[in-house]
Amino acid sequence: MALVTSTLDSVIVVWHVAVNAGDAEAAAAACTEDVEMTSSQGPLRGRDEMSDWVRSSGIKLMPKEAYDVPGGIVVAQEATWPARSDMQPTRLYTAFGLRDGSISGVYPYGSLEEARAHPVAA
C-alpha cells in the first residue's frame, strides 16, 4: 500500500480490516456513536447503521493511497464485491472524518478532488 501521507491513522486500518472481514461490530466500534456515512442507500448515522451496512454490503476495500485533509484523511481504495458478479471493481476515494481517536465520518466519492473537498473536520 503506497501512502502519500505521513501515516494512515490506525483506527482507519482497524476499520478496513473489520469491514473486509465482515466484522460489523468491530467496524462500528472503530467509530464514534454518531458516525455519519454516505452509502448507495443514502445517508446513514450511528454505529447501528454502520453495523447494518457492513453486514449487508459485502464490500471489500483495499487501501491504495492516503492523503491528509483538515480533520481527517482521504483514502484511495479498490472496492470489490466478491459475492456479486454484477459489480465490477471500482476505485473509490473515501474521506474519513476523525474525532477523539475514532472515525466520525465515512464519505466515499468517485474522484480524489471530490473527496478532498468534503468538509470532514469535526
Image (cartoon, rainbow, N blue to C red):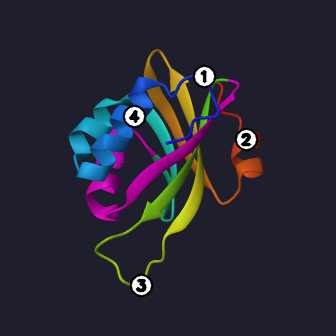
Give whichever of 36, 116 is nearer the camera.
116
The picture places residue 7, in percent across and down from the top left corner, at 54, 23
Can residue 97 be seen here? yes
- Specify start and end residues of the magenta stretch as a single range: 45-70
Of labels 1 and 4, the one closer to you: 1
Q: How far apart are marks 3 and 2 (CA)?
A: 29 Å
Q: Name the residue under label 1.
A: 6
- Any part of residue 33 in sight: no
* Circle 2: element type: helix
Residue annotated with mark 4: 13
Disc number lying in front (3 or 1): 1
Give how far across and how far down residue 115 sits, in percent: 69, 46
What amino acid is at disc 3?
Answer: Asp
Q: How far apart are marks 4 and 2 (CA)?
A: 19 Å
Along the polypeptide, which appears first: circle 4 or circle 3?
4
Q: Position of residue 59 (x, y in %)?
A: 37, 61
In the displayed orientation, state which residue is furthest to the top: 100
**Amino acid at pointer 2:** Arg
Instruction: Return the residue at label 2.
Output: 116
Residue 64 within the magenta-colored segment of the rendering = yes
Q: Do the residues labelled 3 and 2 touch (CB within 8 Å)?
A: no
Q: Which residue is most to the bottom? A: 86
Mark 4 vs mark 2: in front:
4
> Of the residues under marks 1 and 4, which one precedes in the sequence?
1
Asked if 114 appears above or below 104 in the picture, the reply is: below
Any mark on residue 86, and which?
3
Residue at image x 47%, y 61%? Answer: 79
- Residues at badges 1 and 2 in contact (C-beta under 8 Å)? no
Single out the mark in the foreground, 1 or 2: 1
Q: Could you tell me which secondary element the residue under label 1 belongs to?
A: loop
